[in-house]
Image (tube, rainbow, N blue to C red):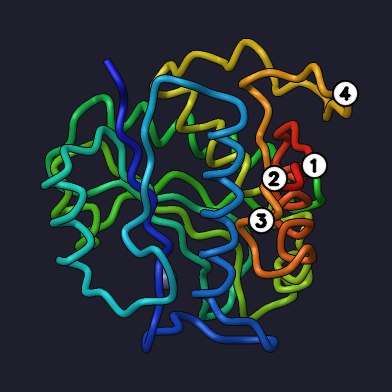
Amino acid sequence: MVKKVKWDPGHGGSDPGAVGNALLEKVLTHKIVGYAMDYLEANFTGFTQSTTRGGDQTLSLTQRTDQANKEGADVFVSVHINAGGGKGFESFIYNGSISSATQAFQNTLHAEVMAAMRKDGVTSDRGKKRANFAVLRQTKMVACLTENLFIDTSDANFLKKEAFLKAVGEAHARGVAKFLGLPVKKSKPAAPKTSSSTTGSLYKVQVGAFAERANADRLAAELKAKGYPVHIVKQ
Ligand SMILES: [Zn+2]
């Protein structure tokens, strides 16, 4: 049974979320979710995933939870950055009636993210909490909301590091994978090949399909960066 994962970058569009230290919550949460999705895609199978907003769009809380409910998502993860003074990481599940699976998911996700943050020097674990948040109340599936440090305190020094955001995103992905029991991808993509004896698994970037060779090169580089074997075919 293919599992459905719904990622919810906490803010977007005209709603920047929390702001502080020249950082916008919506930018940070989009990055964390992007890293989470890349990592899940690269390392696990048996799932589909999507976000509540593809880009920097303004969507209401209800629009986002409606999507997840309509699609029959198995798990909903809302990613946020805290504000208002404080330090550390905390996670939330609904404070009304919830399934034991929801509690199990919070335990797994919280442990993964906190472990990744500790590796990078974060010391404050604010705990596993419960609250009456709309995205938790209105979602019919297992749902958890994470508050990944504070944008308006010295925590921002962590949030300014791209490698930190990547580690936090990847930890979210591991939490989801562990909870859902997603199978690990058996074979990683082969190293880029240069010989002409390559087969169907190879991603061919056709120069003729692009206005400029530079575009083809750029696409090839992007695919390579994602671990796909690529070579450029001239038409
Ligand atoms: Zn938020």
Label 2 and label 3: CA atoms lie apart by 18 Å
Amino acid type, mark 1? Lys
Mark 3 — residue? Answer: 208
The reply to whether dot 2 and dot 3 touch (C-beta < 8 Å) is: no
Instruction: Label 2, secondary structure: give it.
Output: helix
Closer to the camera, 124 or 109?
109
Amino acid type, mark 3? Gly
Depth-wise, is mark 4 or mark 3 nearer the camera? 3
Mark 4 — residue? Answer: 195
Kindly tell me whether mark 2's CB lies below 8 Å from ligand 1: no
Q: Is residue 48 above or below residue 51?
A: above
Closer to the camera, 92 or 162?
162
Q: Is residue 221 above or below residue 199?
A: below
- Residue at x 59%, y 43% (from the top left corner): 38
- Residue at x 67%, y 48% (from the top left corner): 206
Instruction: Label 4, secondary structure: give it.
Output: loop
Mark 1 — residue? Answer: 119
Depth-wise, is mark 2 or mark 1 nearer the camera? 2
Image disc number at residue 223: 2
Label 4 and label 3: CA atoms lie apart by 20 Å
Q: Position of residue 235 (x, y in %)?
A: 70, 47
Mark found first going from the N terminus, 2 or 4: 4
The quarter in which the N terminus is drawn is top left
